[in-house]
Amino acid sequence: MQAKSVPVFPTEITDIIVESLSYSDYYGLPSIKSCALASHFFVPLCQKHIFKAIKINYLLVNGKRSPSAEDFIELMTDNASIADYVHSLSYRFGSEDAFIAPALSDTLMSLKKLQSLTVGYEAAGYQPDLDWQTMELRAAFQHLLNLPTLTQLTLHDKNQNHINNFPLSDLTLASNVDDFGIGHMDFNSGDDDFQLAIAAPLSLKRLRLGCRSEGATKTLLSATLPNGDPVVDLKGLTHLSVHFSVENRQQDIKAIYERVTQLAHLKIELYGETRWPLQIPIIYSGL
């Protein structure tokens, strides 16, 4: 009796099936991982979805921890081709990362197609404030900021820690970023006068002003390049999200509103002081 042959689907059809699995928030990733284990044929198709977004040093909602920086280095060292699949990186500086900074820097340098970058602090444990201008990983992050594929950047930390001395000269490296968010941090003019001299304003479409970003917002809105142009061009801004907590931020909104011409969506989050550890926001979306 002749054995029946197994039908072979075109690669394009298989890719569509695997991609459709990635749209599910709950079942998507486990299903894609199962496909990768089922056959070597599925591995390259699944890897670009499994490693599309990577979080380092995060405490996840299910109580588990995301990979550490050391895990990330090991993964990328053993599978160099994965670097091209990483489109989103969320990194929180961990307490042990200073000891592996050279290896971590080399690993970050291998990313060439990053589209979204979020930088903050490790969720658990005390971390001293970070001085961006003197940190060992600065060159690696300058590489990421300068990638032509990078369109979304978030400098945000929800803990009590602070990102200090983020140079505006480094920010201007992210010339293709049109979606920008800031949190508890501060800017300085930077130490690269040549970069500032050749830089063009960042043309933003989305701006997110997060928790404890009042000081950084004022610096960002008033900062100019040597030729007098603003560091951020808000004329094309369509989406604005502002976090209100203790301090009044009406002046920030007013300063932005005077510079925009295409604003279509405004989101305001109001956090009141409560006796509970968690604060419940009042959210307004519209215009």
Image (spheres, rainbow, N blue to C red):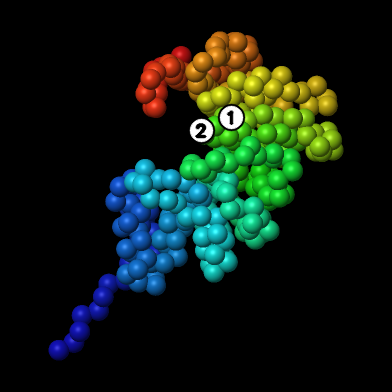
Q: Secondary structure at mark 2?
A: loop
Q: In front here: 243 or 95?
A: 95
The residue that appears at 43% across and 17% down in the rendered structure is: 273
Task: Tell me: residue 123, above or below residue 6.
Answer: above
Task: Tell me: residue 134, above or below residue 67.
Answer: above
Direction from residue 30 to residue 49 in the image, left or right: right
Direction from residue 231 to residue 121 in the image, left or right: left
Mark 1–mark 2 Cα distance, whole angstroms, equals: 7 Å
Residue 286 visible in the displayed image: no
The residue that appears at 68% across and 24% down in the rendered structure is: 220
Direction from residue 26 to residue 241 in the image, left or right: right
**At label 2, which amino acid type do we have?**
Lys
Q: In front here: 45 or 106?
A: 106
**At label 1, which amino acid type do we have?**
His
Tell me where residue 14 appears, x and y as whole percent.
35, 62
Tell me where residue 54 appears, x and y as whole percent.
49, 51
Q: In front here: 180 or 42?
A: 180
Q: Dot 2 corresponds to which residue?
A: 158
Q: Dot 1 corresponds to which residue?
A: 184
Q: In front here: 248 or 255?
A: 248
Residue 242 visible in the displayed image: yes
Mark 1 touches mark 2? (CB < 8 Å) = yes
Mark 2 Cα shell of 10 Å, populated few (<14), some (14-19), many (≥20): some
Tell me where residue 83 appears, x and y as whole percent.
56, 59
The residue that appears at 68% across and 34% down in the rendered structure is: 164
Direction from residue 138 to residue 33 in the image, left or right: left
Q: First in sequence: mark 1 or mark 2?
A: 2
The residue that appears at 35% across and 68% down in the rendered structure is: 37
